[in-house]
Amino acid sequence: MIFLLIFLSLMVSANAKVISMSPALTEIVYALGAKDQLSGVSTYCHYPEEVKGLTRVGTPFSPHYELIVKLNPTLILTQDTHDQKFSSMIKKLGLPFKSYKLESLSDIKLAIKKMATDLKSNDLPQVLTTFEKSEQELKTKNVTGTFYAAIDYKGTIPNLLGFSIASKMTYLSDIVELTGLCNIAPFDTGYKDISLETFLLHPPDFLFIFTRDKAFKANDLKKVFKNKLGLKKIPQILVFNNDYALIPGPRVSLLMSEVARGL
């Protein structure tokens, strides 16, 4: 009976033609050992390296519908925050798709579980174990104080007006909150800019910066705080310069470990 189930699972995988419209979802597919099911990915997908050999079908905001139809997908993977026009058109074309929410840390884990079922993957326990191990690393820190989790979209040393702050309902905030710190973002959802006045009125104890800019240095920002803004209370600044901090996929577990080491 077990061998029959394995055989049927392999048959499903062999016939599957999956298109992923999100870098995070593509990474989940690979983490779940289902890469052989992928036949197309979005223009934004660059990891892992072998994904570059797959057919590019545009993005949810600028899709190549003719190419998508030509690939004859058995399943299209999308994020629920992506262009609703795309989902509507996919429905009209009669193509099967699944939409996953990836806003909070719990959303990411739930999406991985759902996708494991959708792709009939047996690798779920290994992926979740890695997540849980990283979460435990953070929980052992038991730090007190307040924080902002900031994204530097511009890739330059900002004046704070260039920052977007993660609200309490985001995975970046969830990661930091596991350490015991309290997010004092003045809004509840999404990523939004805060004014310089707000920052000066409510300076945090910790400032976590997640950026793709490899040249971004904490000391450079400290100089801005001290010399240009005259800030008396300089927050402890932790900068995470990597390519995956802003991708809500399996490598979030790596980010959690980095945050734990940084503290």
Image: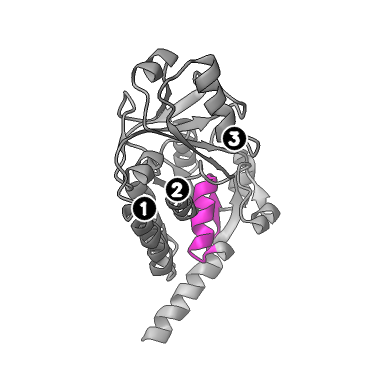
Residue 60, placed above or below residue 255: above
Describe the element under mark 1 as helix, strand or loop: helix
Describe the element under mark 2 as helix, strand or loop: helix
> What amino acid is at disc 2?
Val
Q: Which mark is residue 217?
A: 3
Does the magenta segment cover residue 108?
Answer: no
User: In the image, what residue occupies the spot 49% across and 54% down?
Assistant: 254
Please report whichever mark, 1 or 3, sits nearer to the chain's N-terminal start: 1
| Front disc: 1 or 3 | 3
Q: Which mark is residue 138?
A: 1
For label 2, the crowd category at 10 Å Cα-Cα, with few meaning under 14, some 14 to 19 and many 20 or more, is some
Q: Quadrant of the N terminus?
A: bottom left
Residue 185 coordinates in the image, percent (x, y): 34, 27
Labels 1 & 2 near each other (Cβ < 8 A): yes
> What amino acid is at disc 1?
Leu
The residue labelled by disc 2 is 259
Residue 83 coordinates in the image, percent (x, y): 48, 32
